[in-house]
Image: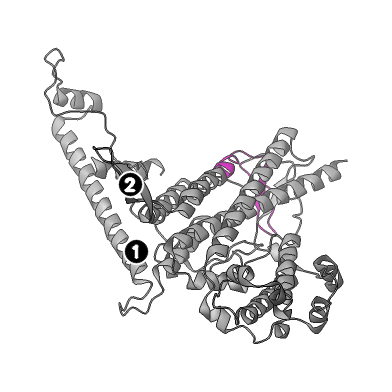
Amino acid sequence: MAKSSIHDENHDVGYRPSVYSVDHNDHLSRETPENSPLSGDSLAYFPSDSETSNFSEPDYGYSSEPLPSRWPASKPRANLAGVSGLPVKQQRNSLSDKLDDDQDLLSSELEMMKERFSKLLLGEDMSGSGKGVCTAVTISNSITNLYATVFGQNLKLEPLKPEKKVMWRREMNCLLSLCDYIVEFAPTAQYLADGTVVEMMTSRPRSDIYINLPALRKLDAMLIEILDGFYDSEFWYVEQGSLSGDSTRSRASSFRRIVQRKDEKWWLPVPCVLPGGLSDKSRKHLREKRDCANQVHKAAMAINNSIIAEMDIPETYMAGLPKSGRTSLRDSMYRFMCIPDKFSPEHLLNHLKISSEHEALELVDRVEASMYAWRRKACLSHSKSSWSKVKELMSESDRIDKNYMLAERAETLLFCLKQRYPELSQTSLDICKIQYNRDVGKAILEGYSRVLEGLAFNIVAWIEDVLREDKAMRKQGT
């Protein structure tokens, strides 16, 4: 019964600037799907313990006991023949063929599942010699590539294709099912029959997964719902240089010249609106969905930042830092940060006159490297390597140390930079953390939040494009 359920379900429905980062134009770099162990066609779905699968057979409370005698016995042959209008023998043959097709489909999906998860567990090392990447990085890559496969060609405000939606939910459920087995142990009081209280260690979901994973699932559902709301819109899309006419819908603006995009968005289709603009209802709907997607973007970005902040700093990053923090900064910045008077990061940023987000990201990398270089020097006289522990152990005389002062000022400047440019891509340290992360739970949460952040950012940008075109058409009509 479960086999046919899988078959029926399938037929009913018919990047910062690195592999780990989201770009603000496309907000996600698209890794070649062929390189991913989970990209391409969909995987067979195996339900986890934490959820009820849509593919599982429902329990209607049937029992093996015979039916009560007051219920009349059914006549399956007569009913089948009468309903279908076919002879019973032909009906049996069609049912047998259908069961054979179901079996073949399930077998092919199981073989595909074995192949994909073999590549996943091997860490993309098909030689089996253990030279592949670790499981955490492989899962992070798999989430990134699944996003590129499902949403990579979706560049418009329109519902996701049913087969893509099923693929996204099924394969994400496979990847997220690992979180069901990531637990932590906590002491729990147990009361014995004689009233004695005994403390025992019991397992429970890890706190970061327990808090963040349900929130990410909710954000995921909200974004899919936003896209589903654009099934019948008053706007449409054309490619660059194409005619805006469409024989399937009546539009007065046929053969209207398409407004060319800016160079940084040359690959996106151009939204078109009828002369006079959108109706008030459609315009209100777009603004509501834009605000909703914007809130989802902020929430996903906050979760992503918190997960990356909890990751350990790799030794390779610390080894690559300059010996002096001054090396990473410009001389003018270093002199400004060394002024003994009160330090003003806002005044420094205004003096630098940052002209683009690319320049701001480069400055963030430099300030971050200098901060950790100064922290390392300040920690040399203490046994603890954690900066928070060092600050607790430092005496007032130690806090006058120049390295400590510069590290504190660099941290303040870094905070102001990220406040002024909240949409910045991931820094070099963030990318390094993700690349060398060995925590599978953090890898799943980081990858999931990152792709949702990218999708929400794209939806907001697409809605802004339509509203901008609507404004232009209303100006032409006046």
Where in the figure is residue 141, as x and y percent of width and height? 47, 66
Q: Which residues are magenta?
A: 225-248
Q: Is residue 336 above or below residue 438?
A: below
Picture quarter with the C terminus? top right
Few, some or many residues within 10 Å of mark 1 (<14, 14–19, 20+): some
Name the magenta segment's main secondary structure.
loop
Q: Is residue 232 magenta?
A: yes
Q: Residues within 10 Å of mark 2 (few under 14, many from 20)?
A: few
- Which residue is depicted at the point 50% across and 62% down? 144
The nearer-to-camera label among 2 and 1 is 2
Marks 2 and 1 sit apart, C-alpha to C-alpha, by: 21 Å
Q: Badge 2 is on which residue?
A: 49
In which quadrant will I find the N terminus? top left
In the image: residue 99, left or right of residue 151: left
Front position in the image: 180 or 12: 180
Q: Secondary structure at mark 1?
A: helix
Residue extending farthest top: 70
In the rendered image, which residue does mark 1 sit on? 116
Residue closer to the observer: 131 or 197: 197
- Residue 358 in view (yes/no): no
